[in-house]
Amino acid sequence: MISDKPVELPAGLMQRAKGGSASKAVIVGAHRDVVIESVRDAVESSLIVPVLVGETSQIKAIAGKIGFSLDDVELIEASGDEDVARKAALRASQSDIGMVVKGHVHTDAYMSALLKGEIGIRQSGRRMTHCFHMTVPGDDRPLIITDAAVNIAPDATTKKAAIVNAVGLARAVGIERPRVAILSATETPLPQMPSSMEAAELSDWAATEVKDADVCGPLAFDNAVSPAAAELKGIENPVAGHADILLVPNIETGNALFKMMVYFSSACAAGVVLGGRIPIVLTSRADPAEARLASVALAKLCSDMG
């Protein structure tokens, strides 16, 4: 059942991201082979100008080993998760930085440092949410999943922010009028299923507040992505069967969904945290090189959009 197909870098995303100037990116915890290799790939793809934060002796040794020149590359010495995260956050707070990218550093230390009020990445009045841009081999059309990594049990206000952030991301990757499905396990609001009731309320809110997208909920997964399933159920709206964005009810649903796509379909999962002053790339040590590079490309597009 586990797919043995190789993960494919989404060509459309990469082509779109290569436009314009490279974005200055703070790489947090750059002192590991896989991180420097990913930085090299992003530099060679004209996506970023890196600022490398970590143990500089190791960074230089790894770069030398793989033939990656550090001429004119800014290096910031730091050791240990807390020191690395703190110094990286301070550098990311400066106006020339377009994105910040997780390297070899624990997620808790990374996010905690970046979200401190004095750093200025968290913006008043906005909520930060995560999006996965999912593509499968042989098909460049993305499916965006939100939120599968940051907000554990989002309330309605956070889900509204997730919709707005995901719509902005979809437009950045070239989807002119995104279609958003608010997932539940039914297409009919049922009091005994709170996610379906909330989905209906969010759909009503979006009808007047989200002008540049079509939003529908509740929808079960099959009726969100399969035209045949939607037709059999008699569901007629622009989203049913054609969703570009899936808003999940909780992190468990989103986490399981994106990992099923990765392991069963060899999907490339590019992930980014939105809603702050700059995009935050939140990669995992288990991510393949393709997902790491696609995540940086996604963040560059978001940074270019402002």
Image (cartoon, helix red, strand yellow):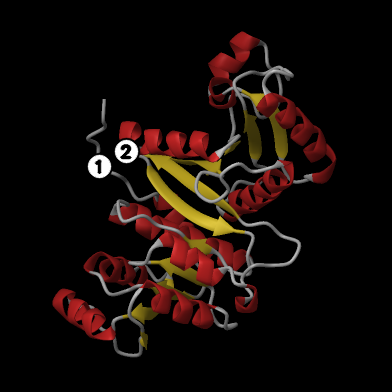
Between 237 and 115, the one lying in front of the other is 115
Query: Residue at (30%, 44%) from the top-left corner?
Result: 7
Q: Which quarter shows the C terminus?
A: bottom right
Q: Quadrant of residue 69?
A: bottom left
Q: Quadrant of residue 123?
A: bottom right
Between 36 and 249, the one lying in front of the other is 249
Between 272 and 234, the one lying in front of the other is 272
Query: Where residue 77 appears, x then y in whole percent?
Result: 35, 86
In the picture as drawn, the residue positioned furthest to the bottom comes out as 72
Q: Amino acid at mark 2?
A: Ser
Task: Judge left or right: residue 274 versus residue 253.
Answer: right
Between 47 and 65, the one lying in front of the other is 65
Q: Which mark is residue 266?
A: 2
Query: Where residue 286 appears, x then y in whole percent?
Result: 30, 51
In the picture as drawn, the residue positioned furthest to the left comes out as 65
Disc 1 packing (10 Å; few <14; some 14–19; many ≥20)? some
Q: Which mark is residue 142?
A: none
Task: Judge left or right: residue 294 versus residue 209.
Answer: left
Name the residue carrying label 1.
Answer: 6
Task: Judge left or right: residue 295 versus residue 55.
Answer: right
Q: Using the rendered image of the protein, determine whether residue 301 is visible from the camera's viewpoint.
A: yes
SS category of the residue bearing label 2: loop
Q: Amino acid at mark 1?
A: Pro
Tell me, yes or no, whether the two marked residues, 2 and 1, touch with CB atoms within 8 Å. yes
Query: Where residue 158 appears, x then y in whole percent?
Result: 69, 48
